[in-house]
Amino acid sequence: MVTLVLVRHAKSDWGDPGLADHDRPLNERGLRDAPQMAQRLADTGFRPDAILSSTALRARTTAQFFGERLGVGVSLEPELYGAGPRILFDRAAATGLDAVLVVAHDPGMSALAGRLSDDAIGHMPTCAVAMFFWPVEDWDVVVAPAASWTFDEPRASR
């Protein structure tokens, strides 16, 4: 079975206008939500074969929380910063692994989640987790929409 998990980075801090977008850290809410969502995913029993992350600080930090909770190292992928849905999907597929988790940014994450859920997921809020499943053994035969999917967001636990 091929599984793709999309995680939009947790809420970032806009407090320092002098910081480049790439260097914005997580804010207090992001630092709270990322470990909680990582634990909720870990509690499902899911373990990815790989975690791919944008190189932006807010994405890297989010990915590190998921990596720690899931016991998987994080691979930093510069092309995921600001990537559109095709690049996000292609980078996951290029791993050739059965289960891949990708941490990146909007609008690409919401666009890809929408395509894979047949537009049922309209928006990926910060730190949302969308899991997509296909009953196939090869990424080359994965098609949209996914055979099944789940969606979770931090607000669901508040």
Image (cartoon, rainbow, N blue to C red):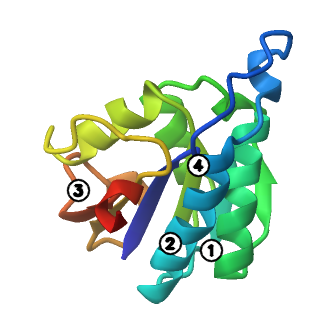
How busy is the neighbourhood of tag 1: few (under 14 within 10 Å), some, or many (20 plus)? Answer: some
Callout 2: helix, strand or loop?
loop
User: In the rendered image, which residue does mark 4 sit on?
Assistant: 29
Compute the Cα span from label 4 to label 1.
28 Å
Query: In which quadrant is the N terminus drawn?
Result: bottom left
Residue 33 vs 56, above or below: the answer is below
Residue nearer the viewer, 73 or 98: 73
Question: Upstream in the sequence, badge 3 or badge 1?
Answer: 1
**Callout 4: helix, strand or loop?**
helix
The mark closer to the camera, 4 or 2, is 4
- Relative placement, left or right, of 150 versus 68 is left
Q: Residue 148 location, x and y as percent?
A: 19, 66
Which residue is disc 1 drawn over?
A: 49
Q: Amino acid at mark 3?
A: Ala
Q: What residue would you read off at disc 2? A: 98
Q: CA distance from mark 3 to mark 1?
A: 19 Å
| Residue located beneath label 3 in the image | 146
**How dense is the environment of label 3, judged by Cα within 10 Å: few (below 14), some, or many (20 and up)?**
many
Q: Quadrant of residue 100 in the image?
A: bottom right
Residue closest to the eye, 135 or 35: 35
Q: Are marks 2 and 1 in contact (CB under 8 Å)?
A: yes
Nearer the camera: disc 4 or disc 3: 4
Res. 55 in view: no
* Amino acid tagged 4: Arg
Q: Between disc 4 and disc 1, whose residue precedes?
A: 4
Residue neighbourhood size for the residue with mark 2, other residues' Cα within 10 Å, grouped as few (<14), some (14–19), many (≥20): some
Mark sitting earlier along the chain (3/2) = 2
Q: Nearer the viewer, residue 106 or 90?
A: 106
Residue type of the residue flagged with mark 1: Asp
